[in-house]
Amino acid sequence: MKIMVAVKRVIDYAVKIRVKPDKSGVETANVKMSMNPFCEIALEEALRLREAGHASEVLVVSMGGAQCSDTLRTALAMGADRAIHVSTSHSLFPLTVAKLLQALATSEKPNILLLGKQAIDDDANQAGQMVAGLLQWPQGTFASKVQMDKEAVGSVTVEREVDGGLETVKLQLPAVITTDLRLNQPRYATLPNIMKAKKKTITQITPEQLGVQITSDLEILEVFEPPKRKAGVIVASVDELLDKLKNEAHVI
Amino acid sequence: MWRRSKHACLRATQFAKLLFSPHLADSSYLHISTGLHLPVLLSADVQSTCNAGESTGIRIVCGVYMNWKRPLNQQFWKHWQRGLATSPGATKVFRDPRFAKLEESDMQHFQEIVGDKGVIVDSSELEVANTDWMNKYHGQSQLLLRPQTTQQVAEILKFCNSRCLAVVPQGGNTGLVGGSVPVFDEIILNLGAMKSILSFDEVSGILVCEAGCILENLDTFVGTKGFTMPLDLGAKGSCQIGGNVSTNAGGLRLLRYGSLHGNVLGLEVVLANGTVVDMLGTLRKDNTGYDLKQLFIGGEGTLGVVTKVSILTPPKLASTNVAFLACEDYESCQNALKEAKKQLGEILSAFEFIDRPALDMALCHLEGTRDPLPSKHNFYLLVETTGSNEAHDKEKLDAFLEAGMELGYFVDGTVAQDSTQAGSFWEIREGISEALVKAGAVYKYDLSVPIKSFYRIVEDLRAQLGNAAVVVAYGHLGDGNVHLNVSAPKYDEQLLAKIEPFVYEWTAACKGSVSAEHGLGFMKPHALHYSKSEEAIHLMEGFKKLLDPKGILNPYKVLPACAATSTCFVSV
């Protein structure tokens, strides 16, 4: 069984981001980038499934400019078997990503497509759901537990974190699963694996070769910081509080 | 009863002085305490030949003279205990009777200087201020002062000097040798309220701030301007820059940015008599006269109170990489250090060492930590690079890692893939101290030894102690500074006797330092002679007498002469 994992290169989680002066986006030059944390969790889950014997190959995929290869090398160092880099300089929105993943899934034919539930730069939370729709595959999103039974071949049980609590769904393979924070703790890439990863293959492919036309169906108009939170005021008495609520905040 | 015992005590002192005069150096003192055990405290050189366990002979002599068969008065015993300072490992010290006791009129005077907010007598706050970070040393101060300006500090010290009231300058109270807490009832002068940043030059990176600024806050502030503080230590969330300067704190990045002696450009200090000395230069180069600030850097608050600091901050470079490597034996660690200096060169910013017991301690007592590597090894290295070009640095790091693996220096390792992973490696290294405190009692030694001998002292001490305690070692391998810690369920004099002076003698034998970065504080004045000559110590005492003739600043600490007070009776 083959598992395909899609990973995204984003600004590192700990970096304090700044908005570009022209408000067209966030400053990414000279800023530390790394793999999206949810994608790391997805990759870790794929590796665990392979180690448990449920899969034989873990294939990792990323899309974007030349620097994606860094992220793919990290993925290979963690233990993925091979990598595909969809090379493009266009900015990619969720629907385009979903179409590219659909094309890849059609050619690679994985049994499970694992993604992080959302990327920490756009917080879109759409690619997984869209690609499941395009492929007409069942989906288990916000997974906090993924179980495969050796007896129940051809299906996977996913426990999902929803607003009301936990929901367990059983999906017929092939299926799309998006991962949430509590699913697992990703492993560290050890040195021997980092050395081995240098020799593993990263296949380059273009959107044209996949037969997908990149259209910008969304346009970013403006990016700005939220207004700075104003300092609170300590009031001396209840009367003063009432006065402020009535006359300044106009809430009573 | 009281008068008679005092008389007997004085006679005993005279007798003992006669007996031991050939052994006593000029500046040493002899104390005899009354009490059931009658220990005899001698000067440091005699002590080394006759430690606690072997003083029986002397005890008997004094006992006969003291007529100690007479049962001791209960009240006398209580008074005696109150006048005694006991801390694990330290010789028993008596409260110096030259220091005055706090009176109501003094309190009123302080209230006039710092206002109501600046005078703290609340018992719970005092308890916190009286206890050191390791919960090992407990003072008995009744008053905590929090001045807000240098002028207030000057007035406080002038008054204390005139009244002969002892003072302990205090910052974040994170010191590890009991230097920041009172021994008896010294007034605590806490500078935490003086926390303004005065100026920052964005071209040169020179920061001027007050002594009470917390290191982490300063780092965040200069970080927004693209700079970083030149020192970094585990206590950064609580320690204050005044304390860092007064103790010449080292830390994790000394390897890259050098010590505070080089990075501090100027200081404003207040002397014991209230004189404000403004040496707050912001010049990189200034060769006009003697460089006085160097005395106060590392002076541990015994020569003056630091109130303002001017420090040079290096630019904050964008690309950091952290690798956590495992080695089988200590020789490989040394080879890895050599290789790192060769291959990583100018981008190397930290090279830390952790042995297996230390890692186990951290993983056991710190929440949320996990072993970065899948299998257990004997030694671990934490290597950090900081540079301006990510691709360039990664290339260098890769070359170093490949070379190290091929030559067999490390058997396993991992490179942090994002800042969360890097943070988790540092959390382990920085948290070992905290983990040791949580594990129980800890005897902490901070030694500078030649890198070749770095681990031999650990092995020798382990052989010496056997199963009595766990010996862990970690430290700044890049600087040759090992933090040797002995963890035991509780503080035990017998265990201490096996550790000291063994550790100090071992260090002295290879001409090392008995306190690489922690300072002397209350814990180590008696060990100073292991690393400094008699002449040097005499010169230090000269400076102390010059700058603080009444000895009110941080008494009982740092210099051996100050640690041994000349009294043998109890003050009530």
Image (cartoon, coloured by chain):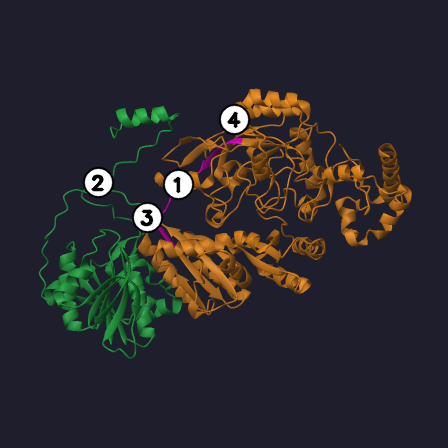
Chain colours: A green, B orange
In this rendering, the label closer to the viewer, 3 or 2: 2
Label 2 crowd (10 A; few <14 / some 14-19 / many >=20): some
Q: Residue at the spot x=73%, y=33% of the render?
A: B96
User: CB atoms at circles 1 and 4 under 8 Å apart?
Assistant: no
Which residue bears the numbered disc 3? Answer: A15
Residues at marks 3 and 2 on the same chain: yes
Which residue is nearer to you in this view: A130 or A108?
Answer: A130
Badge 3 or badge 2: first in the primary sequence: 3
Which residue bears the numbered disc 2? Answer: A224
Q: Main secondary structure of the magenta part?
A: strand
Label 4 crowd (10 A; few <14 / some 14-19 / many >=20): few
Which residue bears the numbered disc 4? Answer: B117
Q: Marks 3 and 2, Cα distance to the nearest angstrom? A: 17 Å
Residue B264 on the magenta span? no
Q: Residue at the spot x=32%, y=54% of the render?
A: B390
- Residue B297 pos. (x, y %): 56, 37
Task: Read off the magenta span.
Answer: B307-321
Q: Marks 1 and 4, Cα distance to the nearest angstrom? A: 28 Å
**Quadrant showing the N terminus of chain A:** bottom left
Q: Marks 1 and 3, Cα distance to the nearest angstrom? A: 13 Å
Q: Residue at the spot x=84%, y=41% of the render?
A: B72
Q: Secondary structure at mark 4?
A: helix
User: CB atoms at circles 4 and 3 under 8 Å apart?
Assistant: no
Q: Read off the chain for label 1.
A: B
Q: Read off the chain for label 4.
A: B
Q: Read off the chain for label 3.
A: A
Q: Secondary structure at mark 1?
A: helix
Q: Marks 4 and 3, Cα distance to the nearest angstrom? A: 39 Å
In the rendered view, does B264 fall on the left or right side of B28?
left
* Residue B220 image label: 1
Number of marks in picture: 4
